Image (spheres, grey):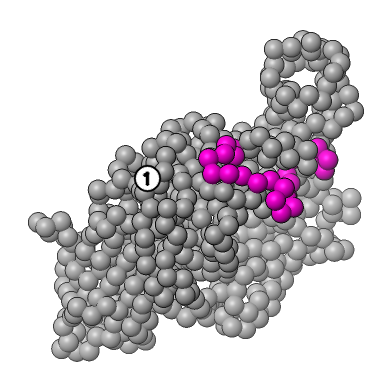
Amino acid sequence: MRLLILTALLGGFCYGQKSVPTDYFDNPLKIPLILSGSFGELRSNHFHSGLDIKTQQREGIPIYAPADGVVTRIKVGHYGYGKALYISHPNGYSTVYAHLQRYAGEIEEFVKRTQYARESYEVEMFPDGGKLKVNRGDLIGYTGNSGSSGGPHLHFEIRDSSSRPMNPMLFGIEIPDSKKPLVNSVFAYPMGEQSHVNGSQNPVKLRLVLQKDGTYRTKSISALGEIGFGVSTYDQQDGASNKNGVYKIITTVNGKENFNVLFEKFSFGETRYLNRFIDYHYWRTNKSRVQKLFRQTNNPLSIITKEDNSGKVNIEEGYDANYVIEILDYSGNKQRIFVPINGKNETIVKPLALKKTDDFVYADQATSITKGKFSIYIPANALYENTYLDIEAKGDTLIFHEDNIPIHKNISITADASNFRKEDMDKLYLGRLNYKGEPYYNTTYRKGNKLTAKTRTFGSFTLVADDTPPSIKPVNFSDEKWISSNKTLKVKIEDDLSGIGSYRATINGKFILMEYNYKKDVLTYNFDDNIISESENNFKVNVVDNAGNNATFEATFFRK
């Protein structure tokens, strides 16, 4: 199926590139395109870098090369993109395919040879130039659910020559969409020390009233000083109920544009600044992402393509303004929100809610803090703005603020574990407590009696001793039984504390490749790998958790 190719002007955002190529890429799937995720969509700590194409709730749909090219990278991992494939094309662009079930043809053979040579399921390969060539229409793989995927789909990207992901819809992928974007909420943000909205110096949620023409209008607000606005919005295409990202947001003040956001391209180096772009505190407390329609310090995002006074609005007493938010999807469907503003100096009835503590951190300076047995190192620019932090040590637990402030760079936490027995030291780690108060593993380094972990999330951390080995149970076979009809060999592996760290399996002493599905806690070996030739076979798997505890399972099976 040939894509309908559209020419799109990218303007100044495109770093000198004026248009995307036309009539170049085919559709990688020969099924109707329905999206579960759009380009630029707001995700945890990042903008979505491609299109998530639904695969009819099943795996194994063929993927075809959309143009001639060369495979330049293959990465197989338990998490993230899972099984991923990268193809470079002669026009300077590259395409990426993630969460695959398996590769096809020469690519699959190359991957398997490498995995067995390295005796590792997780591998990353950069084939020599020209070693794995593909032609337009070649079968390159099958859709799946590998890695950190929440369900079967194909994650598809197009990147420019500098490896910056671009919106694939610019290249002509046509997604039926007759629905205009939807709006959850609109907020007003007083920005200056004397600024206020409706008598409040705190963010104010505005009441939305649906108009007869389908637009929204808020009740008139009274304001003074410098203020900004934010909106929680999403888009839905035809045939899907997923809450996908929008394409463009334009704001105007009395008809003059003052802030534009365009989801056409970004770099991976800037994607974590999403946490500065959204109202992070509101996201953590209400599970709704509000896009701030103004630029604050330490926000270098290139998706902001136009700004007047950083998108902020200066309101003087007696000044009336009409602020308009226009939201568009890629098909041109739009929604408008009108916000009438009256400049009025009102009595402040809700002063800025600011909890002052003993620990004040300047964002542009490195800071060291000691609490009980814990030492904390916050590098310069780990935080986006100067902040009071609420920190307390209680024995082996560090209460390190609440997760309502974003962290951009890793913060180091070091604990003095000298009160633990020497024989227990190797089983210790610093775990972050979840909402149930249960610890989960943080990569932890030990030097003497000191344990160190890094974090980009506030919360509570505690010293945890894990001396319990993982459990291993057979799933589709039993010891001393015939399994000639089995296509696979499966075992369930679990570890309740530090989690699975590594594993290795053999049959008759030979390494076998077992795929780890962490979502189901299952290791799977495929007999198509043709490792065994005997009728009687000894299977052995060793599993090590992140604290170094190991467990071994052995069984004998028979197979014709």
Asked if residue 422 shows in the view, the reply is: yes
Q: Secondary structure at mark 1?
A: loop
Towards the viewer: 232 or 14: 14
- Quarter holding the C terminus is top right
Over which residues does the magenta segment extend? 116-141
474 shown above or below 140: above
- Quarter holding the N terminus is top left
In the picture, residue 450 is in which quadrant?
A: bottom right
Horizontal relation, residue 509 to residue 76: left or right: right
Instruction: Write down the residue under mark 1.
Output: 242
77 shown above or below 512: below
Could you classify mark 1 by the number of other residues whose Cα lies within 10 Å: few (under 14), some (14-19), or many (20 or more)? some
Q: Residue furthest bottom?
A: 317
In the rendered structure, does residue 53 fall within the stretch colored magenta? no
In the rendered structure, does residue 118 fall within the stretch colored magenta? yes
Q: Amino acid at mark 1?
A: Asn
Horizontal relation, residue 202 to residue 546: left or right: left
Asked if residue 80 shows in the view, the reply is: no
Q: Residue furthest left?
A: 212
360 shown above or below 159: below
In the picture, residue 516 is in which quadrant?
A: top right
